[in-house]
Image: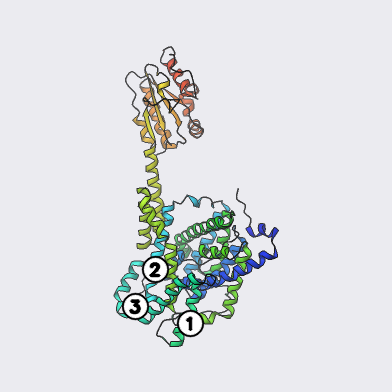
């Protein structure tokens, strides 16, 4: 069973000074990477740039201190940008705070209820679909800042389609200086890592473009122009109990569920990737609890929803981080940035922020995996993938996940019902099946049917397809391949029994497995049919049929039994 114990308390038993040095270096480097990303993601989320750094500080510290992974780095991620922007646009920062705190509580409950292992049952096409959809919406949302377009008619688009419409309606306002700065930032982001791998290209892009805009006095929008009241210094407690009205809680409940599910999925995916890189094993339920505490803490200090960040976690590992100390150093380093360097953030050009988010959108899109699934996956999975992707772009993530999971469940049941077969015995190759009909003789007036596959409500109707003949006295149902049975199938089995009884036919069941037998006993069907009519093997069932049909037992073609 997964331990509810932070990984920090386990790894510190054998902690060394050499590892401390590596963790400190890794933490500082990750902080440098996280700084421009946190600012960019906060702006994409419709909040002030400082909110992104506050999130990285508070959530990053709590996830490292309480989390179930050795190396997880948490903070704002692109997956939340469009969701948060929608909440802020409709309900303001107070609505976002309520939704985030509620999501944190849900995550903690999920952790204590041991739901960490259940999230793996979300189909891969849904994850790939909504991740690619989020990437597209994030990309579209940054076109305005990259091109310097100005909304002349006071548009405040929220949905992706509305943003595209507003962009096309205001194409005449494109600022070509902004486009050049954005293009320069993109070139740096792409080329720099090919030359220097230790220093993140996003930091260089921010420094170079800010210097050019400031030095050349270009007419390019900056963070200082876009956000006049940027808070500096350490974050203060910003929670207001008065906003937790019943109406607000009700209105934010669906948003809270979305944030909790997305935070849980992304964090555990990141932890799994990290495990494969360092040969470790995370504690999923403890990770969920830590994510819950982190989101509550982030909201209380003016931050936004947070989750494990795969890119920053990978950077932590590549730079030597092997314990949660690295993540805590990353948070402390960002505290120093907030205290001493935050005023300089006002100089960062908005096209540069957009370029960074373009790269983030490209990296998270997973387009290769998307195309691969479209080429080689079963048709039902392709339908789920494309539907989830389209709904994420056209509507939002809530609708996409709900419809995606519902569609996956329906298509899965359809596939399983197709697998389940109810067939009368027919000649097969005895070499392939030592229990086949060719090795034994069916008594007169006896009909043998074999059920293959789970018997659940989608396939239960096939039981009633069994049609005894006029001279049938015994109906043998072989159930060796029935792994499970539900209430609907049980009801159909009872209807079959009643029909047989009305015709004077005795029902005999062979090789009933453990789960179906429990259901049969609990329903009273076991006593109704009679203990003597439940046989462990098909040969026993045929012997019982011979006796019931009033015939002597015939010699089998082969004495060998399974």
Tell me if residue 480 comes above or below residue 186 in the rendering: above
Q: Is residue 228 visible?
A: no
Q: How many marks?
A: 3
Residue 137 drawn at (x, y percent): 39, 66
* Residue positioned 44% across, 30% down in the render: 479
Q: Circle 3 sits on which residue?
A: 151
Please rate how many residues cluster around mark 3, counting C-alpha atoms within 10 Å: few if below 14, some from 14 to 19, many from 20.
some
Q: Which residue is mark 1?
A: 347
Query: Which of the two discs, 2 and 1, labels the residue nearer the N terminus?
Result: 2
Return the residue nearer the eye: 494 or 159.
159
Query: Dot 2: what SS?
Result: helix
Position of residue 247 relative to residue 342, above or below, is above
How far across and down, in percent of the image, does residue 95 sit?
47, 68
Q: Which residue is mark 2?
A: 139
* Disc 3, SS: loop
Tell me which label, 3 or 1, sits earlier in the chain: 3
Quadrant in which residue 362 is drawn: bottom left
Instruction: Relative to 480, say whether 280 is above or below.
Output: below
Q: What is the secondary structure assignment of the residue under circle 1? A: helix
Q: Residue furthest top?
A: 552
- Which disc, if any, is residue 462? none
* Near-viewer residue (413 or 139): 139
Q: CA distance from mark 2 to mark 1?
A: 23 Å
């Amino acid at each position: 069973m997964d331990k509810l114990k932070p990984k920090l308390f386990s790894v510190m038993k054998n902690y060394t000074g050499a590892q401390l040095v590596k963790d400190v270096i890794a933490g500082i480097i990750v902080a440098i990477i996280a700084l421009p990303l946190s600012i960019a993601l906060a702006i994409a989320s419709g909040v002030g740039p400082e909110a992104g750094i506050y999130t990285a500080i508070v959530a990053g510290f709590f996830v490292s201190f309480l989390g179930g992974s050795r190396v997880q780095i948490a903070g704002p991620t692109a997956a939340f940008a469009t969701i948060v922007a929608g909440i802020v646009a409709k309900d303001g920062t107070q609505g976002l705070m309520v939704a985030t705190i509620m999501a944190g509580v849900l995550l903690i409950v999920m952790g204590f209820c041991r739901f960490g292992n259940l999230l793996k049952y979300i189909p891969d096409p849904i994850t790939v679909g909504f991740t690619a959809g989020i990437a597209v919406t994030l990309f579209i949302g940054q076109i305005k800042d990259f091109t310097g377009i100005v909304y002349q008619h006071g548009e405040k688009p929220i949905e992706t389609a509305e943003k595209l419409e507003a962009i096309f309606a205001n194409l005449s306002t494109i600022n070509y200086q902004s486009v050049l700065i954005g293009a320069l930032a993109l070139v740096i982001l792409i080329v720099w890592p090919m030359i220097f791998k230790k220093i993140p290209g996003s930091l260089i892009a921010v420094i170079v473009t800010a210097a050019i805009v400031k030095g050349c006095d270009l007419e390019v929008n900056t963070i200082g122009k876009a956000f006049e009241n940027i808070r500096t210094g350490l974050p203060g407690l910003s929670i207001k109990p008065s906003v937790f009205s019943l109406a607000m809680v009700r209105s934010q409940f669906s948003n809270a569920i979305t944030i909790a599910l997305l935070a849980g999925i992304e964090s555990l995916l990141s932890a799994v990737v990290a495990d494969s890189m360092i040969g470790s094993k995370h504690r999923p339920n403890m990770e969920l609890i830590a994510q819950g505490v982190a989101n509550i803490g982030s909201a209380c200090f003016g931050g936004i929803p947070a989750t494990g960040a795969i890119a920053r976690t990978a950077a932590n590992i590549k730079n030597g981080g092997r314990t949660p100390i690295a993540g805590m150093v990353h948070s402390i380093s960002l505290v120093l940035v907030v205290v001493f360097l935050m005023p300089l953030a006002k100089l960062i050009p908005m096209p540069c922020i957009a370029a960074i988010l373009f790269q983030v959108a490209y990296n998270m899109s997973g387009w290769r995996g998307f195309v691969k699934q479209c080429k080689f996956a079963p048709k039902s999975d392709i339908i789920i993938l494309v539907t989830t992707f389209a709904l994420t772009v056209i509507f939002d993530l809530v609708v996409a996940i709900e419809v995606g999971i519902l569609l996956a469940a329906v298509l899965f049941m359809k596939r399983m019902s197709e697998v389940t077969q109810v067939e009368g015995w027919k000649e097969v190759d005895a070499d392939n099946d030592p229990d086949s009909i060719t090795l034994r003789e069916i008594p007169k007036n006896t009909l043998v049917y074999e059920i293959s596959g789970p018997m659940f409500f989608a396939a239960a109707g096939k039981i009633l397809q069994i049609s005894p003949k006029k001279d049938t006295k015994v109906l043998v149902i072989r159930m060796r391949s029935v792994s499970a049975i539900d209430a609907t199938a049980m009801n159909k089995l009872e209807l079959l029994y009643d029909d047989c009884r009305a015709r004077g036919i005795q029902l005999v069941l062979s090789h009933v497995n453990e789960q179906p037998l429990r259901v049969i006993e609990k329903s009273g069907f076991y006593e109704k049919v009679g203990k003597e009519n439940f046989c462990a093997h098909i040969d026993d069932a045929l012997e019982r049929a011979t006796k019931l049909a009033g015939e002597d037992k015939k010699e089998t073609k082969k004495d060998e039994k399974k």
